[in-house]
Amino acid sequence: MKITVETTVAAPVAEVWRAYTTPDDIKQWNAASDDWHTTAATVDLRAGGAFSSRMEAKDGSMGFDFAGIYTKVEEPRLIEYSFGDRTAQVAFAPEGSGVKVQVSFDSEDTHSVEQQRGGWQAILDNFKRYVEAKSRSR
């Protein structure tokens, strides 16, 4: 089953794309809640290239690597990737004065669909806040 989350970011598409694909930016926004953070990120943004984000609880109690392989990259419109036996697609579409970012991913069996949707949406909401604040400060 595919789950889709989306947001519209009030910033130029080039800034939105860059923030989504640059390791230093990823470390700033890639968390579902304030008690988690991303301590390391790597990106080889090309079909066949690998990515990885180290996500950890701020109290040090747990952490995991979210990693995979890019299967399709069409800058600045589309990123597709696989992670384990699952796939995801990130679409960037100019809309009004911003960019609609839509993430669709294969669900897994450990967490409910609502939990998965909520977690991925929270990360996307953090992304929106980060990019818009960064864009305003320029």
Image: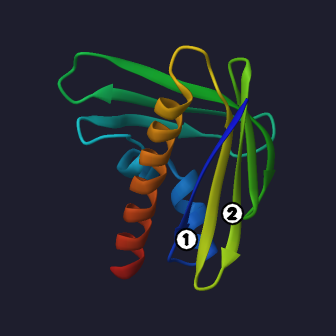
Residue 72 bears which disc, if any? none
- In the image, 98: left or right of 122? right
- In the image, 6: left or right of 127? right
* Quadrant, the C terminus: bottom left
Residue 15 image offset from top left, x and y in percent: 55, 71
Task: Choose between 15 and 7: the one closer to the eye.
Answer: 7
Residue 81 image offset from top left, x and y in percent: 73, 36
Q: Residue at x 53, y 38 (%)?
A: 117
Q: Residue at x 38, y 41 (%)?
A: 31
Q: Amino acid at mark 2?
A: Phe
Question: Is label 2 in a helix, a strand or a loop?
Answer: strand
Label 1 sits on residue = 15
Residue 130 image offset from top left, x and y in percent: 38, 62
The answer to whether any part of residue 138 appears in the image is: no
Quarter of image, res 6: bottom right
Q: Amino acid at mark 1?
A: Glu
Q: Nearer the viewer, mark 1 or mark 2?
A: 2
| Label 2 Cα crowd, 10 Å radius (few <14 / some 14-19 / many 20+) | many
Residue 7 in the image: above or below residue 55: below
- Give the residue at the far bottom of this rendering: 97
The answer to whether any part of residue 120 appears in the image is: yes
Label 2 sits on residue = 92
Q: Residue at x 23, y 35 (%)?
A: 35
